[in-house]
Structure formats: structure tokens, C-alpha cells
Image: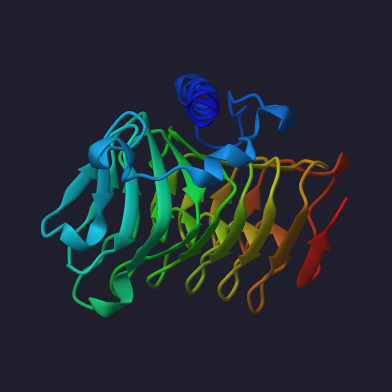
Amino acid sequence: MKKYLSLFLIMLMFCAVVSAGCGGGGGDSGIDAPDQTDNPSDDTLSYNPEDDGGRGMFGPGIDLSTITSDYTVQTGATLTGTLRSNVKISIADGAIVFLRDVTIDGSEYDSSYWDGITCLGSASIFLMGNNYVKGFGDGGSAGISVPGGKSLSISGSGSLTAVSGGKGAGIGSSWYDSCGNIMIIDGIINATGGEYCAGIGSSGLGECGNITINGGTVTATGGDRAAGIGGGYDSECGNITISNRVTRVTAIAGYDAPNSIGAGLNGTCGTVRIGGELGEISEYYYTYQP
């Protein structure tokens, strides 16, 4: 009973994040950073998506190995397993989705050019276990994308590795596209951008909204001419805020990029605030640990 109450409280918190909405560019994200006490209890780790006759908390448990056509995940569902088909996985607008030991490796399908996970609107992803998501093909796909004017929040006690399929961000926008605001609340996050694209943020010739990292351990690596966190080549990025409540944030700039956190080459970025200090970080390799 305790684990379901804990998960219910998490769902309420995520619903508040998604319903807040957000805008692109350098404006206010419209999202209040949750208090660390809102993080899930350890009981969450024992949650089994196969409980209750194969259902997730409020929706079905979905084994990706059984998916053979394009699929849109609805709120409350738990994704598990390895995707074994050349199909597009999307998250419905406003949905709260659980990932538990998921593998989506789009590099096996060179002829396809869609993101590893495509958010169709605002979404919240809760991590359990170890998860790997890579964009499809070698074109302009992101690991995980969220459309402009919307928001993506990522939390949980699991891990996520998000990798571009080519010229896209690890988490953010696909090539020459825009993405909304990105909030990382908790978890172990490793994000790698493709050529000219940020690890977390915008692709080359693209744009993204505000990026907020409020907790967890985050490593973000940019492609050539792109920041680890922030902007890709010749792109726009909103405000970047890294809280002093994170465990550790490491940002690695790509070759010829001016900042590890901030704008990419020939790009612009809003206000960068790291643990209360203002300013972009120009080092190629930068680690912030409060």
C-alpha cells in the first residue's frame, strides 16, 4: 500500500509540472522547481509493471519487444524491454510515463529518421532501472525530443542514456527544429548530442526553451561546435539553471565550441545560472558539484 501511495504522490507532482506549460526562447519556464522532499521513496524501486495483471500504475505495462507498429504511449503506462522493430515510439501530450529497463536503439535502422522517443506535447518521464534510448538512422534525430512550446520533465531513481541518431540533441531538438523546456528533477542522466548538436538542448540550426537541472547526476556531451548543455551550432537556447541541489553535473563541449554550458558556436543563449552564479562556462570540460 505504501508504494502505491508514494507513486500516487509522484503522479500528482508530475501532473502539476505538465499542466504548468511552458514557452520557448529565453522566457520564464512556467515551472516551479519541486522540493527535494518530493522525490520518490525507496519503495518505488520495488514497483513491478507486471503487477495487477500486467498493468502499470494507472495503465498497461508495455513490453517493447511485442510492438510491431508505430505506438503512442498513454499516461500511466510502464515501458519495459527492448524495441525490436523499425517503428516510432511517441508519448501522448500531457502523459506521465514510466521507463523500466528500456532499450531503444535506432542505429540499427539507417533508413529511418525519427527520434528514439518523440514527445507529442508536454510529458513527464519517470525512470526505473537502466534505460537506453538512441535516435533512428544517421540523419537529424534526437534521442528524446519535445516540441517547441511544451515541456519535458525527467525524474526517478533509475538511469537514462539518451543519444542522438545523427544531427540531433541527446535530449532536446532534432536537426533544424525547435524544442520546448527541459527539466531534470532526479536520476542518472547521460546525454550525447550528434554533430553540431548539444547533449541537452538544441540541435544545430535549431532552438530550445529553458533548461533546468534541479537534481540528480547529469553528464552531457555536445557534438562539434555545440555545448554540452545549451545550444548547438548557430542555434538559440533559453535560460539555463543548475540548482545547488544536484549531485553532480558534467558538461563537455564539442570541438570548436565556445562553451561547455551556454551557447554553441555562432549561437545565442539566455541567462546561465549555476548554483547561484551567473555566466556561461567556457571550459571545454566542466564539472559542477555543490
Residue 230 x, y percent position in the rendering: 62, 54
- Number of labels in the image equals 0
Q: Residue at x 66, y 40 (%)?
A: 239
In the picture shown, does residue 81 fall above or below 49?
below
Q: How is the image coloured?
A: rainbow
In the picture shown, does residue 26 fall above or below 109?
above
Left or right of 154? Residue 168 is: left
Residue 278 x, y percent position in the rendering: 85, 43
Q: Residue at x 46, y 59 (%)?
A: 205
Q: Quadrant of residue 266?
A: bottom right
Q: Residue at x 80, y 63 (%)?
A: 287
Q: Mark yes or no: residue 275 visible.
A: yes
Q: Tell which of 148 and 267 is nearer to you.
A: 148
In the picture shown, does residue 290 fall above or below 8?
below
Residue 98 x, y percent position in the rendering: 41, 43
Left or right of 279? Residue 121 is: left
Q: Looking at this view, name the residue that lies furthest to the front.
A: 1
Q: Mark yes or no: residue 208 visible.
A: no
Residue 66 x, y percent position in the rendering: 16, 59
